[in-house]
Amino acid sequence: MSFVRSAIAAIVYAALMTAWAWHDRDPFRDSYLLGFLFYGLTFGIVFHVLMNWVARKDSSKTG
């Protein structure tokens, strides 16, 4: 998976999680921006690594 697709997925996830936190009036460490950055970076890195691992595992089975 490319970095661009991972970044888009991370931005969408971070936006949804930040909107949920805003709806619950529960900011991450008293800052919605900090929560957005935390969610985006954490999800983006984990998602990118996981999707590349799945793609590598899938390609080794079919090849």
Image (cartoon, rainbow, N blue to C red):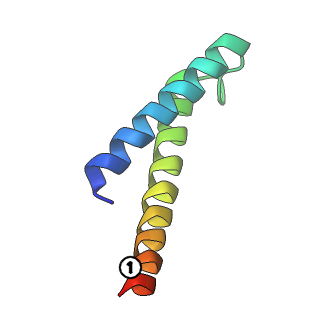
SS for dot 1: helix
Is 46 or 53 nearer to us in this picture? 53
Please say if 22 is above or below 42: above
The spot of residue 36 in percent (x, y) is 50, 31
The spot of residue 8 in percent (x, y) is 35, 39
Residue found 29% across the figure and 54% down from its top = 3
Q: Amino acid at mark 1?
A: Ser
Could you tell whether 33 is left or right of 11 in the image? right
Quarter holding the N terminus is: bottom left
Is 38 or 58 nearer to us in this picture? 58
Looking at the rendered structure, the number of numbered marks drawn on it comes to: 1
Residue indicated by mark 1: 59
Could you tell whether 7 is left or right of 49 in the image? left
Residue found 64% across the figure and 20% down from its top = 20
Residue lying at the far front in this picture: please name it. Answer: 62
Residue found 50% across the figure and 35% down from its top = 13
Residue found 53% across the figure and 50% down from its top = 42
Is 30 or 26 nearer to us in this picture? 26
Quarter holding the C terminus is: bottom left
The spot of residue 48 in percent (x, y) is 42, 59
Quarter assignment of residue 39: top right
Q: Residues within 10 Å of mark 1 (few under 14, many from 20)?
A: few
The spot of residue 32 in percent (x, y) is 55, 22
